[in-house]
Amino acid sequence: DAKTTQPTSMDCAEGRAANLPCNHSTISGNEYVYWYRQIHSQGPQYIIHGLKNNETNEMASLIITEDRKSSTLILPHATLRDTAVYYCIGFRGAQKLVFGQGTRLTINP
Amino acid sequence: EPEVTQTPSHQVTQMGQEVILRCVPISNHLYFYWYRQILGQKVEFLVSFYNNEISEKSEIFDDQFSVERPDGSNFTLKIRSTKLEDSAMYFCASSPGGTANEKLFFGSGTQLSVL
């Protein structure tokens, strides 16, 4: 599995877009980039995933660079409930999902 | 959206006792997982289960641990003789078919406290 690198923590003002970066320079061609988050001590929650193309769903947008060495998760209008630890993970399926330390995102009022 | 259900939400036990943590994965899912998270630490993989057998396990998953799918709906994690360091939040997860292009669904966890 690709090793991913994320900032330890970030802050964002409520209502603004939160942009969370992730470096995954060792990602292989068949690994998807997944984003999960963990709010307090709840179970990890799926946000979005992609392989090559940018993706958008009701929660977020995922921008993957053309060389696939990095990506950015965008929460377009962050709310206080988006305060959580966000994990960027490379995943090939049929094997374990490996969580790193993630980025602790704090949304400030 | 369908949910993975875990019971109990909290379990307190004495060191050396056996505990069974229970999970009901999403009904048409084929892959099942257990993860744990010690307070303040990362979410750690324990074991994955497919077709009624363990497909992968971590170094943490030693002989004290076992998993079972006793019927068509439940997926259990048994710790045979609990130790203080087994105190953690345990998360169950499931996925439809184990492919790269599908997400894992996690339960809300069981907080295990070993005294």
Image: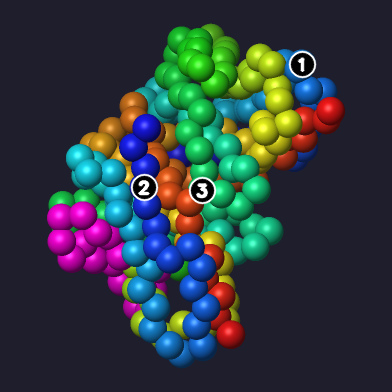
Q: Do the numbered discs 3 and 2 sit on residues whose CB atoms are within 8 Å?
A: yes
Picture coordinates of residue A39 (x, y %)?
62, 43
Mark 1 = which residue?
A: A16
Say which element carries label 3: loop
Residue A57 located within the stretch drawn in magenta: no
> What segment is highlighted magenta in the picture?
B61-76
Between residue A29 and residue B106, name the one nearer to us: B106
Say which element carries label 1: loop
Magenta stretch, overall SS: loop
Is residue A29 depicted above or below B94 in this figure? above
Mark 3 = which residue?
A: A43
What is the C-alpha distance between the residues marked 3 and 2?
10 Å
Picture coordinates of residue A6 (x, y %)?
68, 34
Counting residues from the start of the chain, the first of labels 3 and 1 encountered is 1
Relative horizontal placement of residue B59, taking residue A37 as reference (left or right): left
Do dots 3 and 2 share one subunit? no
